[in-house]
């Protein structure tokens, strides 16, 4: 659990509904911004494959962060 807290620090900080919504919005905005930037950079001919991989990893991180956020808030994770 300590490793998860180090990797996903925002997911373990929501104590009430307003914080849950704020951290959820942070993850969603970060996903949109990173997706837009990486989408532009993925058009570079030789680096496109690397940026496609980075895009997949950031999407996975954001999805896992959101899942952990909700699981921790609803006390499934302790």
Image: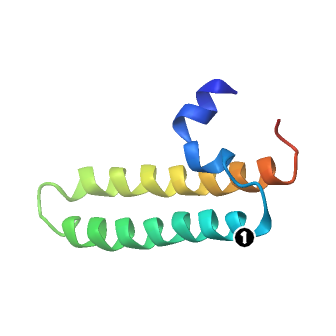
Q: Is residue 62 left or right of residue 44?
A: right
- Residue found farthest to the left: 45
Residue named by callout 1: 18
Q: In the rendered image, which quarter is residue 44 located in?
A: bottom left
Residue 50: percent from left, percent from top = 25, 50
Front residue of this view, candidates 72 and 64? 72
Quadrant of image for the C terminus = top right
The residue at 29%/65% (across/down) is 38
Which image quarter: residue 63? bottom right
Question: Residue at the right extreme?
Answer: 75
Left or right, 27 with reference to 52: right
Name above or below for residue 77 compared with residue 25: above
Q: Left or right: where does residue 13 sit relative to residue 41?
A: right
Q: Residue at x 27, y 56 (%)?
A: 51
Question: Does 40 sit above or below residue 5?
Answer: below
Q: Residue at x 76, y 56 (%)?
A: 70
SS at circle 1: helix
- At a point 16% along the width and 54% down the height, the residue shown is 47
Please tell me how many numbered marks the rendered image carries: 1
Quadrant that contains the N terminus: top right
Q: Nearer the viewer, residue 18 or 36?
A: 18
Quarter of the rendering containing residue 8: top right
Residue 9 place in picture, x, y as percent: 56, 43
Q: Crowding at label 1, few (<14), some or many (≥20) Cα neighbours within 10 Å?
A: few
Please say if 68 is above or below 30: above
């Amino acid at each position: 659990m300590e490793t998860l807290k180090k990797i996903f620090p925002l997911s373990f900080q929501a104590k009430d509904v307003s914080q849950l919504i704020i951290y959820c919005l942070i993850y969603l905005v970060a996903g949109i911004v990173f997706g837009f930037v990486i989408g532009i950079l993925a058009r570079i001919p030789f680096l496109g494959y690397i940026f496609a991989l980075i895009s997949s990893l950031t999407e996975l991180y954001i999805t896992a962060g959101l899942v952990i956020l909700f699981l921790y808030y609803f006390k499934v994770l302790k």
